[in-house]
Image (tube, helix red, strand yellow):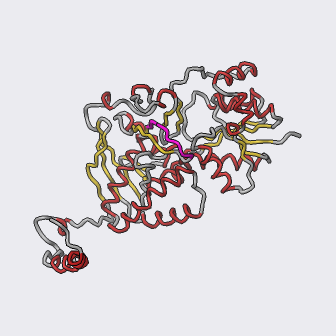
Amino acid sequence: MADSVVLAYSGGLDTSVLVGWLMDKGYDVHCLYVDLGQPCEDRQAILQKALDIGAKSSELVDCQEELCQDFAFPVLQWQAKYENIYLLGTSIARPLISKACLQRAREVGAVAYVHGATGKGNDQCRFQLAAEALDPKVNVIAPWRIEEFRKQFPGRTEMLAYCEQKNIPVKATTKKPYSSDENCLHISYEAGVLEDPAVDGIPQIDFGMTVSPQEAPDQETHVTIGFESGVPVSLNGEKKSAAAMVKELNDIAGKNGVGRIDIVENRFVGMKSRGVYEAPGMTCLYAAHQSLEQLTLDRDAVHLRDRLSPEVAEMVYYGFWYCAKMDALMAFIRELQQPVTGEVTLGLYKGNVRTIGRTSPNSLYDEAIASMESGGDYNQTDAEGFLRIMGLPLRVQGGVRPREY
């Protein structure tokens, strides 16, 4: 009896070729389509295609709610952005794909987990590091890191020829202006014409979630987002599941041209790469969450979180989701976020997001203290002694090391 493997399967050119190639190697192939909200014309047709190629089984698992609730929202609570701009939509999804594939591998008794990530990119790291953390004895097959596979398929022309030979139906052509990857959190675009950082990437792309800001409505759109302990729970007064929240905000914000970025980023493997992303819903959630934190978190707590946030973003980007350090950091952020409850109203206009208002039962903002008109419990005379104490080390240093002025 042939050994079984589980393939993270999308139905596209690469993973369709992998089904045939793995069968050529003598494996029984179990395909798993992890549904993260990526668009496709007919999911059943994609699953059937794997069976038609010769897969032993072809299954779908819906992980959209888990992706948003258990992966994206904790990262949102951290306000984590890789290199200050990227909202990590692809990075967050990869550990979940590995988790789902390993669960399927256990069900079918597979000897290996197979993915189609290249040996140049970040995804191979995210897939493999997550898999090894969940199952230290896992065997990961990454064909793009196998020289024999690369010699057989040096480019898309050879892959298309293989599909024609094997009667594998594909829609791809040899023309490749760019590649894209999508889930309900965002769409990423890279490669092709985007590999030249001097080229304006925006006109090259047929965006799937956002309209051009120039084509967005001339009137500002308002949305109100409710949070409980830092987790988005309602939209315009209606309770929403995590996935429904993200999808509805994608639609509203996307129509207003919100959420596009263009970045040259540093990959984990050491090279720089250029990517264009759109994440309309998550852009709104990040903005609303940050505004609510301004009301509800004290200075030292939020500054500590902000110092750690880039490290969390880096860990997510590199693929260290399942590790003791991340477990500890997630426990920390759950505690920190307890008071982050309330509502924020945003204004969306031609690609811009602004905060219109925010309210919270846990607000630390005291108008009487903050007002320029009255002092409340704040006695300005107290500042005299405060500043004398704070200035003591500066006065001592100034006596020893005079500065020119």
Q: Is residue 270 left or right of residue 85?
A: right
- Place residue 158 in its image quadrant: top right
Q: Judge whether residue 274 is colored magenta.
A: yes
Residues rendered magenta in the picture: 269-277
Q: Is residue 107 above or below residue 19?
A: below
Query: Is 395 or 171 nearer to us in this picture?
Result: 395
Magenta segment's dominant SS is strand
Q: Is residue 77 visible?
A: no
> Could you say where residue 119 lies in the image, as x and y percent from the top left?
63, 40
> Could you say where residue 62 lies in the image, as x and y percent from the top left?
61, 43
> Could you say where residue 170 lies in the image, as x and y percent from the top left?
65, 23
Q: Residue furthest right?
A: 1
Query: Is 208 or 117 nearer to us in this picture?
Result: 117
Identity of the residue drawn at 36% across and 64% down: 303
Q: Is residue 143 visible?
A: yes
Q: Judge whether residue 82 is colored magenta.
A: no
Question: Which image quarter holds the N terminus?
Answer: top right
> Could you say where residue 319 lies in the image, as x and y percent from the top left?
57, 51
Q: Is residue 242 above or below residue 262?
A: below
Q: Is residue 308 left or right of residue 15?
A: left
Q: Is residue 125 left or right of residue 243?
A: right
Q: Is residue 182 above or below residue 356?
A: above
